[in-house]
Image (tube, rainbow, N blue to C red):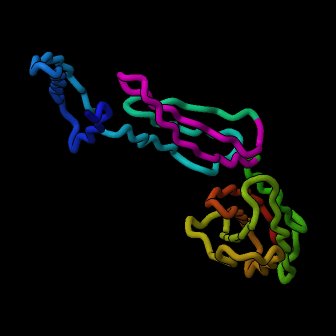
């Protein structure tokens, strides 16, 4: 006499369902249904990065189609990707993308011309990017091809270089932010 029956399919396929009704005289009436069972909808969308600089883009890969989003200001963005199957079932996946201003190396040197025996001071600094900057300083004679490392990436912002010859030198200052963006700045110093 129970008229409410639940069926829980154990795999994604088509099921034939037959409902039989019998009256008090033993007469039977049948009705047939087809139940289509689909796999659970799973949103496997991905984004290329959760942290970018303002001039960069984020690639969104939703199913087989890629979409690019180019933010117009430095802030946090919420991205929602919806996947809809043929039956209208929708699954959502959420991402947060932090957009930073472009990393800008604002380092300076004390002078572009010094006398032999003097030092040139580098004041490393930066703006933009993801913060927590580290700095690397390299120098070489203009005529050389190999750079000498004065400071590998470190939080120290004050570096002094004492050239050993009266000639022209190149100085390179690199700044790196907490997500790995690097900006370089080059200086020339003449030693007399």
Q: Does 12 appear above or below 149?
A: above
Residue lying farthest to the right in this orientation: 110
Residue 6 screen position, x and y as percent: 30, 38
Left or right, 84 with reference to 115: left
Picture coordinates of residue 115, whole percent (x, y): 87, 75
Does the magenta segment cover residue 37?
A: no
Q: Quadrant of residue 27?
A: top left
Task: Name the quarter where the C terminus is drawn.
Answer: bottom right
Query: Left or right: where does residue 18 sit relative to residue 169?
Result: left
Q: Which residue is drawn at 65% across and 76% down?
A: 152
Name above or below for residue 53 compared with residue 38: below
Q: Is residue 49 left or right of residue 189?
A: left
Taking the spot 26% from the left edge, 38% from the top edge, the residue there is: 7
Name the spot of residue 49 as percent of width and height, x first: 56, 48
Q: Position of residue 146 (x, y in %)?
A: 56, 69
Q: Indicate whether 165 appears above or below 181.
A: below
Up-down relation of residue 45 to residue 111 (above or below): above
Q: Does the magenta stretch include residue 96?
A: yes
> Which residue is pictured at 77% across the width and 56% down the height?
105
Image quarter for residue 119? bottom right
Between 80 and 173, the one nearer to me in the picture:
80
- In-front residue for pair 78/143: 78
User: Looking at the image, which residue is at 43% across and 40% down?
Assistant: 43
Specify the segment rendered in magenta. Answer: 73-100
Q: Quadrant of the N terminus?
A: top left
Count all numbered tags in the image, as a single digit: 0
Q: Is the magenta stretch mostly helix, strand or loop?
A: strand
């Amino acid at each position: 006499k129970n008229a409410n029956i639940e069926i829980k399919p154990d795999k994604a396929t088509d099921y034939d369902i037959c409902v039989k009704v019998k009256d008090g005289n033993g007469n039977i009436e049948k009705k047939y249904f087809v139940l289509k069972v689909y796999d659970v909808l799973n949103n496997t969308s991905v984004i290329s990065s959760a942290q970018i600089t303002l001039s960069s883009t984020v690639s969104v890969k939703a199913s087989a189609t890629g979409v690019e989003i180019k933010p117009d200001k430095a802030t946090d963005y919420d991205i929602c990707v919806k996947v809809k199957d043929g039956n209208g079932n929708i699954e959502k996946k959420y991402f947060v993308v932090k957009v930073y201003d472009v990393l800008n190396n604002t380092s300076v040197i004390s002078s572009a011309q010094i006398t032999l025996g003097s030092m040139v001071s580098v004041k490393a600094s930066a703006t933009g990017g993801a913060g927590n900057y580290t700095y690397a300083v390299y120098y070489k004679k203009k005529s050389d091809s190999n750079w000498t490392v004065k400071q590998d990436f470190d939080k120290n912002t004050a570096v002094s270089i004492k050239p050993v010859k009266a000639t022209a030198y190149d100085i390179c200052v690199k700044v790196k932010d907490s997500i790995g963006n690097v900006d370089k700045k080059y200086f020339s110093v003449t030693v007399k």
